[in-house]
Amino acid sequence: MAQLSEFLAVLEAALPADALLTDTADLRTYECDGLTGRRVVPAAVCLPESTEEVQAVVRACAAHRVPFVARGAGTGLSGGALPVAEGVVISLARMNRVLDVDLYSQRITVQPGVTNLQVTEAVAAHHLYYAPDPSSQQVCTIGGNVAENSGGAHCLKYGFTVNHVTGLTVVLPDGERIALGGASLESPGPDVIGVFVGSEGTLGIATEITLRLLPRPAAVVTQLAAFDSTDEAGAAVSAIVAARILPSAMEIMDRLTIEAAEAAVNAGYPEDSGAILIVELDGVAAQVEEDLAALDRICREHGAWEIRTAADAAERALLWKGRKSAFGAMGRVSQSYYVQDGVVPRTKLPQVLRRIAELEQEYGLRVGNVFHAGDGNLHPLVLYDEHVAGESERARELADAILVACIDAGGSLTGEHGIGTDKACAMPLMFGRDDLDVMQRLRRAFDPAGLANPGKLFPTPRLCGEVPGPYRQHPLERAGLAERL
Ligand SMILES: Cc1cc2nc3c(=O)[nH]c(=O)nc-3n(C[C@H](O)[C@H](O)[C@H](O)COP(=O)(O)OP(=O)(O)OC[C@H]3O[C@@H](n4cnc5c(N)ncnc54)[C@H](O)[C@@H]3O)c2cc1C
């Protein structure tokens, strides 16, 4: 206790008056992120406003060997910002300033607490925008996007966050400040920005981020096609790609998700359809027009019985509003739901969707499907009632079985929501011991003391139950590469 009060006194001295929270009621605000089933109240929360203040907090953590967890808006769905009980949450919410806009180079430099949408808003008057667009873009922060390598509907054509970050200022876990990259797309040497983006807060804290901006395309068209089944809609997606059309987005929603979205935002989706496909084309007007004609033909050939092209920007926004509200809308049809995030090769979409339908029957639970079809990135929403005994456990098992189906189909554990605490134990489904060893070694190069967001991303032997029976030391621990938490 004496040590904790000494540590808190150091933090108090390093931060402005209202930037250190230790009252339990205040701390509870930070006890979870979007994965609300897991909650831990931290020892303290710091709200720094500058890189120097972040450095001061991280240095104090290093000196007292206190773990720390960076936090943006807390919208993460994999428990990445879940606190450590004896640790500190470093909230970047007050670091929310745009630092520089370079129109000539089409770059913007922001603090990590700026939201995704604010980046586009800051340059909209210049007909520029920031391409990666998570559905949570109104609230999620650029710092969180960088840590999770976030995606969004338009990443099909424009790439994920990692393709848009050109420079970073990072506070390493010992408090040192480093600069990576700058305004140019390429820098010599290993791609350390590529290593940091997607590292889920385990390598340090990003305090300044330079991003690429893109010119607004001359023409944009959004089309909705209604099908009887996700099989037909999925086959249309494969045919669109085979026809060498590259839409900026291709999203599928199934009947249950359409029902929920309609109840929440009344987007005008045909409610009697088994699936809808939303496709957006952008670019030069003549090319968009040509692709639109081909798109129309392909969708009809694959069973589309209603095709609607948004007449104007307002109708386009409404079509997207339904899709982007889909997760939240599920609250209309179910007490609780778990959002799974897995990837399959695009051609395996129908096979995996059929497996999900089988699993619904096996587990007696409903699953809504909404997904980035062009990327093969599924987001099954497993519905359950937490007040019914055993149902949340069954939902969890069903969600895990979906992940296994994705891996069996040659896919991946996550498309964009990250591993966090949620899927750390699933990492061995995809990676062998040698792979995990290499990842741990890389992490230790940045964070030898293991203080930055411990317990995330990597399986820990005890918590993942890899070794049944009494606890025995895992080979990774014996080698000093993993810690028991
Ligand atoms: C309704 C809804 C829709 C969503 N849709 C999408 C989607 O379409 N695509 C998508 O990719 N995700 C989506 N998400 C997930 C989530 O919004 C993203 O993962 C987002 O990037 C998290 O940002 P955040 O600011 O909330 O980060 P947090 O949840 O606060 O943190 C996420 C991770 O980032 C780390 N972190 C935060 N800031 C920093 C920093 N400055 N430096 C280092 N590490 C840091 C944290 O430690 C944690 O590990 C959705 C979530 C919700 C609730």
Image (cartoon, rainbow, N blue to C red):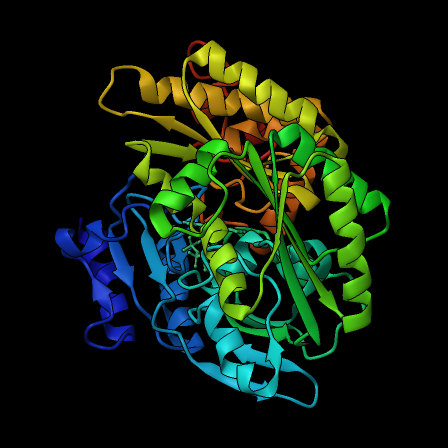
Q: Residue at x 78, y 56 (%)?
A: 293
For the C terminus, the quadrant is top left
Tell me: 207 left or right of 242. left
Tally of numbered discs: 0
Residue 369 percent across, percent down from the top left:
52, 34
**Position above or below: 286 against 405:** below
Decide: is 400 above or below 27: above
Image point (49%, 68%), residue name: 314
Q: Position of residue 373 (x, y in %)?
A: 65, 42
Name, please, the residue furthest toward the bottom: 104
Residue 480 appears in the rendering? yes
Viewer-proximal residue, 191 or 134? 134
Residue 344 at least partly seen: no
- As drawn, the residue found furthest toward the front would be 305
Q: Is residue 201 above or below residue 380?
A: below
Q: Which residue is drawn at 64% across and 81% down?
A: 107
Image x and y of residue 474, in percent: 55, 23
Q: In this view, does 420 lie to the left or right of 282?
A: left
* Residue drawn at x 41%, y 19% as measured from the top left: 365
Comparing 298 with 22, the one in front is 298
